[in-house]
Amino acid sequence: MNLITAKKLKKEYSQYRWQTNSNEIFTEEMTLFTLTGKDVTYSLAALESGHLAHVYYGKRADDEDLSYLMRLNENPYTPKVNKRDMGTFMDSAPFEYPCHGIGDYREPTIMLMDSEGMSALDLRFVSYEITDGKPILEQALEDCTVRIPATFAEKDEAQTLAITLKDNRTGLTAVLYYTVFAELDAITRSVRLINNGTKAFDVRRVMSACVDFDSCDYDFITLNGSWARERIIERSPLHHGKQSVDSVKGESSHQNNPFTALVSHNANEDIGEAFGFGLVYSGNFFAQAEVTQHKKTRFVMGINHFDFSWTLEPQKSFTAPEVVMVYSSEGIGKMSRTYHDLYRRHLIRGEYKDKRRPILINNWEATYFNFNTEKLIDIAKQASALGIEMLVMDDGWFGHRDSDNSSLGDWFVCEKKINGGLKYLVDEVNKLGMKFGIWFEPEMISPDSELYKAHPDWAIQINGMPLTQSREQYVLDYSRKEVRDYIYGLMCKILDSANIEYIKWDMNRQLTEVGSNALPAGRQRELWHRYVLGVYDVMDRLTSDYPHILLENCSGGGARFDAGMLFYSPQIWTSDDTDAIERLKIQHGTSICYPPSAMGAHVSDCPNHTVGRTTPFSTRGNVAMVGTFGYELDVTRISEQDRNEIPGQIEQFKKYNPLIRTGDQYRIGNVFEDNTWDAWIFVAKDKSEAVFTFVQVLGRPNYGSRRIKLKGLDPNGKYLSSETGEIHTGAALMNCGINITVHGDFSSKVIYFNRAD
Ligand code: DGJ
């Protein structure tokens, strides 16, 4: 495998070789690195000066020497690597990991506060190494080492380039990792900082990736929203100055997702260039595109530097999370499909990675806090008879929790509600042939709890400041191992007490008064990141100790739908908005970079609890079928007619889920542009079958049927339609389309196509 090459080059422009103040020449030659994925090339160079320059990122070039693109001796405002024009060079050359304080006034990737109060850095090339596969990422802490979530690859699936840079004054070493995947147009990047100096310094900013694009002719795509409106797509042309999205809430957030893309102005689902950037991280993040004076774009992404600081003692290291860069020359759709493949194969782990997930029924919207053993068994009885495979007991089973105002942290079964005990309940559910799942919110503490009485100092807090409540709860200080150990110990007791096969891990508030009673003053600003590392630590222990348990992440709906969480949980609750029509946007937006098969999606009751809308039961099923599929209603109380539809929906889901989980998704409709209909199709990798879904948002009088063009089929293949029984070529279905007739607002249909040649 030869996905990465390193070439020594001696170019005629070496006359412009820049010398340091001590007249020391770094190297005689420059080293050009070329990374080649399936249809993508990424090229960078360590110049003779030691600066690490960006050369090219885009469609595969099949040329190992793109150094002619570097313009090292053009005039007047383009870079020259010489002493006289160093400022010009620094402020305009494309860099891989630009420093602050030495003449590059664009967004830096790294800043320190050193022992002398200085923040400038001058990182220069030292060495490189190319290895097969992909190293794991870790962060050593005082009392444990935390594995940092990241994509993984076998030795024959990817290659990694590690480039070491060093700042001589402070002794800071930065190792930049680039992994390129053989079968995908994906390159991942991360950074490890090591203090090889003699004095401690504070890292004030450490981005995981920077790409200096040669133009600003792009649109910036972000996924924004709010509770019940997560990952709504926004797209706007880049303009001079900086446009950014971030989170300062301690989690990836409802408001902005740690994913952005730069796409060519003409890009749509099927054509144009798309450069996606996703951060494998679940805390405060930062992503920014900056249009420079020369109409170029600097894109950076990483942990948010806002309120961040990390003290690095001599010989200690800091690992910044991974950025996943995906390139597509065939539109946004292809970019999404690459993310889906990458995350399904190289990020999601565990026993359920490649398995259909159990069809569950969750009691949240069915009962909220008002349930007991009998009620749950009633639901389970009806559900099992209809073919539902797992009962999930949501919030309210512990402490004295009858509302959201108490007991978080007291992970003891509330015998008043779970009369007979948890084991009895689980056994009864198991006897019905169903699995049992349970809800936890392990990061939280209620002021009204035994835990808070015993350990008020365990909440994240700043002494002397009133502590902000949100949903009447505080956040536990997960930077403290004793806190994590205690909570995890309680969880284990519950998990060991009965046959529990699924956990919903919820997180229902963001961080405020960010201070820890366990950290020294100089390290308090580390808490944002230490908190996230603490969460990762517990999730790692949980998934290792209980590999058979299916973990579903959740955060007040979909506030933590991020790639970091996918490393632990193969599915994430997409949104508390379960309305089928609202879900069209939410699921479309989420599918931009996350696999639909990881989206928690349920059929709920109507009028919908969030928007009050009534939609057909069949449409609720057809929309939820894209995701993990389940029910979130009181099956004992819905209409006979709806209940009778459940077995058919389950059969449909079981039939199509393998295709949805492994196939390619093509979005056909775009509810962000035309909110009157939506459609998508999942096509098998070998093009042997496809399942198409159409949803009409609003009925339209007297227009007749809609003609919808399918996508992704083999144009030369012949396909049998489950709707008409007719056989047509893929070319006809894609170029000419099919006529879709549906009647009524919110109606929908699913059509299966299988190969008939
Ligand atoms: C928020 C989640 O998104 C809901 O599904 C539910 O689990 C509640 N929390 C419970 O408090």
Image (spheres, helix red, strand yellow):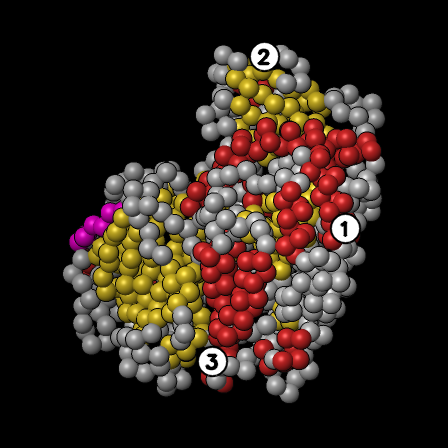
Rendered image: mark on residue 727: 2
Which quarter of the rendered picture does the N terminus lie within?
Answer: top left
Q: Residue at x 64, y 36 (%)?
A: 625
Left/right placement of residue 517 relative to residue 52 reads right
- Camera-side mark, 1 or 3: 1
Left/right placement of residue 555 relative to residue 55 reads right
Q: Residue at x 28, y 63 (%)?
A: 164
Image location of residue 181, percent across then percent down: 36, 44
Residue position marked by numbered label 3 in the rendering: 523
- Few, some or many residues within 10 Å of mark 2 (<14, 14–19, 20+): some
Q: Which badge, 2 or 1, is on the more N-terminal residue?
A: 1
Real-space Cα distance between discs 2 and 1? 52 Å
Name the residue type under label 1: Glu
Q: Which residues are magenta?
A: 4-10
Name the residue type under label 3: Arg
Q: Secondary structure at mark 1?
A: helix
Q: In the picture shown, does residue 705 fall above or below 558?
A: above
Image location of residue 76, percent across then percent down: 35, 59
Real-space Cα distance between discs 1 and 3? 50 Å
Real-space Cα distance between discs 3 and 2? 67 Å
Depth order, front residue of 587/497:
497
Residue 5 located within the stretch drawn in magenta: yes
Q: Which badge, 3 or 2, is on the more N-terminal residue?
A: 3
